Amino acid sequence: MRKVCIAGNWKMNMTPSEGVVFAKALAEAVKDASVRVVVAPPFVTIPGVAEALQESSIEVAAQNMADHLSGAYTGEVSAPMLKELGVSVVILGHSERRALYGESDAFINRKVKLALAEDLDVILCVGETLEEREAGQLETVLKRQVIEGLKDVSASEMSHIIIAYEPVWAIGTGKTATPDDANSAHAFIRSEIEKLYSKSVAESLIIQYGGSVKPSNVKDLMAMKHIDGALVGGAALSVEQFGPIVRYNK
């Protein structure tokens, strides 16, 4: 049985002091959650949030990390630095990193392998743009991103991988893939994982949906066979919205 994972990506929002207040309120609001809950604050907000969540079951993630452990890489943050702060998960390959900062599949793959070597769990983001979807390239894009993103990742390491399917056209736009559309994409990803590894690896893989998840649509999405959680953006910045998403099954 796959354990649902709901993750909140704060992106470049919330100062350290705001993050602490939010984290404490969220921990209280979801203390009875039966799912895995993860929050991903900005780098500078991580220390306070990690401390505020020490007594809760909510895990702290980073939104990105460097592809090196140390060295002359101005502005970068390494896995050992994140781990010392209490980070246990890292989001890699987010569509904004791909589109705005030109991160390639090969570059993302280097970070995935490094994160796994440093005992961090990885949320690997994949997804198509509106242009790619309309051109009938959804499966081509997903296949490439999955294969290249997981290159040289072993079957045993896959237990530390979550894949987040995020249709780029639905991020921050208010648009959402229908539950059936999302489930179909998730099923395709799972089938590709089975080809790469095995049926057991594919069946145990957590695949999140990310794309304007809200309290109003989370139950319908989570009712789908292949959807095992959500990577939440805008709604993750409000306890009033993120709380009900986490507690969708209550």
Image (cartoon, grey):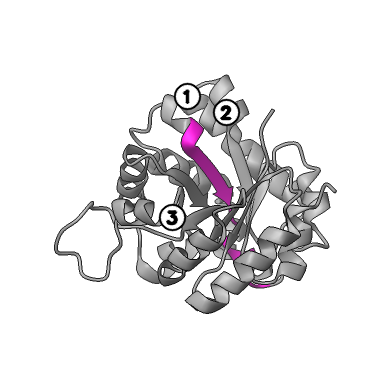
- Give the mark nearer the N terminus: 2 vs 1: 1
Q: Is residue 224 left or right of residue 61?
A: right
Q: Which residue is mark 3?
A: 93
Q: Which residue is mark 1?
A: 197
The answer to which quarter of the image holds residue 100 is: bottom left
The residue segment tinted magenta is 159-173
Up/down of 17 relative to 222, above or below = below
171 in the magenta segment: yes
Element under label 1?
loop
Locate residue 144, reporting x and y percent.
Answer: 44, 44
Which residue is drawn at the image coordinates 47% and 32% (left, top)? 158
Q: Is residue 76 left or right of residue 173?
A: left
Disc 3 marks a residue whose amino acid type is Gly
Q: Which mark is residue 202?
A: 2
Q: Looking at the image, can residue 32 be seen?
A: yes
- Give the mark nearer the N terminus: 1 vs 3: 3
Q: Which of the two residues, 37 or 215, is positioned nearer the viewer here? A: 37
